[in-house]
Image (cartoon, coloured by chain):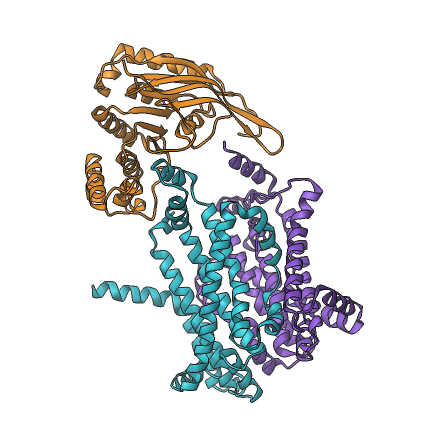
Amino acid sequence: MAENLIEIEGLRKQFDAPGGQSHIALEGIDLAVREGEFVSILGPSGCGKSTLLYMVGGFIAPSAGRIRVAGTAVDRPGPDRGPVFQEFALFPWKTVLQNVMYGLRVQNVPKAMARARAMALLDMVNLGPYADFFPKQLSGGMRQRVAIARTLAYEPRILLMDEPFGALDAHTRTNLQNELLGIWERDRKTVLFVTHGVDEAVFLSDRIVVMSASPGRVDEIVVVDLPRPRVRAELLVDRRYQDLVLHLEARLEVMQPSRTGAFS
Amino acid sequence: MNRVRSSTAWYWLGSIWPVLLVLALWQGVTAGGLIGPQLLPSPLAIAERLVERLQQPEFLFQIGQTLIRLGLGFAIALVAGMLLGAAMALGGERWLGPLVRLLAPVPKIALYPGLVLLFGYGHASKVALVVADVVFPIIYATYHGMRSVQPKLVWSAQAAGAGAGATILGVLLPSATPSLLTGCRIGLVIACINVFLAEMISSTDGLGHLLIVAARSYQVVDMFVPLVLISLIGLCLASALQWLRNRLPAAAA
Amino acid sequence: MSPGAVRGARARATGVAALPRPGGRHLLGRVLPLVLPLLFVALVWEACSRWAQTEEMPGLAEIGAAFVAILGSPRDLAGVSASLWRMAAGFALGLAIAVPVGLAMGRSPALARALNPITTMVYPVPKAALMPIIMLWFGIGDLSKVLVIFLGVSLPLLYHSYQGARSVDEKLVWSARAMGMRAAPRLVRIVLPGALPEVLLGCRVGIAMALITMVSSEMIARQDGAGELLFNALDMAVYPEVYAMILLIALIGLGLDFGFERLRRWLVRWSDTLQANDA
């Protein structure tokens, strides 16, 4: 039984506006994630799922509660928790290869070795020929693959993915979902995957944390007991898959995010 | 290859024709005698005189004086402006912001007599004027360039393990470069203008001074030559920076 | 939403620039950021003056006395106000000519293509440097001075009006055309209000340029007015008066900018675009 890699206890996040109003984004979040698990965080807009992810990443500080990764408290970003953002966040002034090499160079890996590892990763995501292109010359799907390769390059223990396929068209999205699972199957990293797509969450995950909004709380944790490797064509006609999707869709339907005015 | 080159030439011509038209009209009006040469010399006469003067070492010396002040002033303003702008972007806005906002609307040319008192009639007062006026667009460009960096870029760098220094140098500055180049373009033109005006107001040498000397002796063509020259210098510098900015991959954003 | 994004959202909602302003809404909080830098500059000056101990760098007391003397002298005030009137005339001329042309450029790509190369060429020319040439043509009277100021303000007014007109949402214009509005009324009733935020930014730059052009052209021409007073003091080695005049001109610049900014903010309070609030 793998140990808990991520432990979140009593997490709370409150944002204060200068006018004196405050908005509670997250309240009382308790969550434990085992090493090698693929966990999705699913919920309607405004439920704080991205905020939760960023706090695990160390980009935002909690108002109360604790996050521990491998036993140590999280207080800043680090290469053990690699982010992949919806907007790709590639450095526009660097080539594709330079972007992927970035984390390695920051950690003082010798240039030749960094180059080799970066090229290997680019080949893995089928972007080898584009190594010397600039991000602006690539399509959205290609940029996201570069972003994933860049994060994988410095071999984080945990992948923090914030709706990484949200900005892509449906076809590219399904392709990348398959690619992501293929990559994940190789190393079995721990993944926290934020999404508001039910079928995406069920397709990818071992467990799904369903969140409700205003304030963001854990509504339910659903175990996805479907066999791997997951093949979309088979899943679509699998009864268990359909039940899971229906159940989750119904839960999301029930949750109506309330409006707090100042922050919408 | 030849086809590509000639099509770019046509494209260039296509965008510059209004200027050529104005020049042609100007030539026509003056050469045709509608306006006398003692009021407005023809562009050809000015060009001829310019070429003639460019072969005179004394004229080249004057150009050199102007360029020295221009270059030195701009260089100092660039360094100071980048440091101040970066300081403001990284948290110093509380203290530096009000000071910059206070001094910005003051017409710096009005400071020139004071600068002459403090620094004398030579290079220093003009360099000081250029620094005073050019530092503001540079501060502004650096500040806004660094502030408008996408936070996710910074987060990506931090997650990869980059410390504060590496983040500033490796992410904030490259992101700010397009903005900075635009600020430099504005700054260079302001520098040219300020040097020239300062040399007109009070100086013993330089291009601006030459204009005043020519004005006093009613040498109309010689009044136009330094003016045209400084304008061409400003134009070339601005165009060079614009070209540089467009070549940057980061300018796509 | 991060606190910064919240601040930005509220700022956008109220139309105020989103750069953080220390102090918030308290009166002291608003006055202090203006007063503190002034005090800082004054203290630095006084310290340098005492340290240098030269005639060329008089202390605050002497400068203050000279300043009061200028304000009390009818002749000096007449010169300064004449300068300001000429500035206003040149600016008004710019508004009347450069703004409409700029707006038209924004709506007509052909006109823009024709005029843009010319404005690019003219941009690096120091407008005040044209003063001797203009005086050659139009004599030494007010016309030359007003004309030079007009030339100085035209470019920023033109450029910003052009940009403003360009950025007007095409759908607004289409709606007006569908209602049967003709080109000229459209320009005034749809394009101008839509372009107004940008035009007013151009005016802010234009006011600064008017002052700069006025001061520099008068320092070159040396007949009367603020610039002449300034340079006269230098020539006659009345050093405190030099700095007092600089101070006066600086205060005029600050006052005009501050006053116009309030007007501009109020006029575009409906706009949801962020407006930069530095020069």
In front of the other: B37 or C80: C80
Chain C, hue in figure = purple
In front of the other: C245 or A243: C245
Q: Residue C92 placed where, x, y %?
A: 65, 64
Is B177 situated above or below A18?
below
Which residue is depicted at the point 25% across and 65% down?
B5
Q: Quadrant of residue A22?
A: top right
In front of the other: C138 or C28: C28
Q: Residue B248 placed where, x, y %?
A: 34, 54
Is C224 situated above or below C158?
below
Q: Can the viewer see residue B22? A: no
Q: Can the viewer see residue A19? A: yes
Which residue is depicted at the point 65% across and 61% down?
C47
Give the tally of numbered discs.
Answer: 0
**Left or right: A74 in relation to A120:** right
Question: Quick one: quadrant of the N terminus of chain B?
Answer: bottom left
Q: Residue C155 placed where, x, y %?
A: 54, 64
Is B234 situated above or below B148?
below
Q: Quadrant of residue C43?
A: bottom right
Q: Residue C261 placed where, x, y %?
A: 64, 52
Is A125 situated above or below C204?
above
Chain assigned cyan: B
Q: Quadrant of residue C129?
A: bottom right
Q: Residue furthest bottom?
A: B217
**Left or right: A225 in relation to C103:** left
Chain A, hue in figure = orange
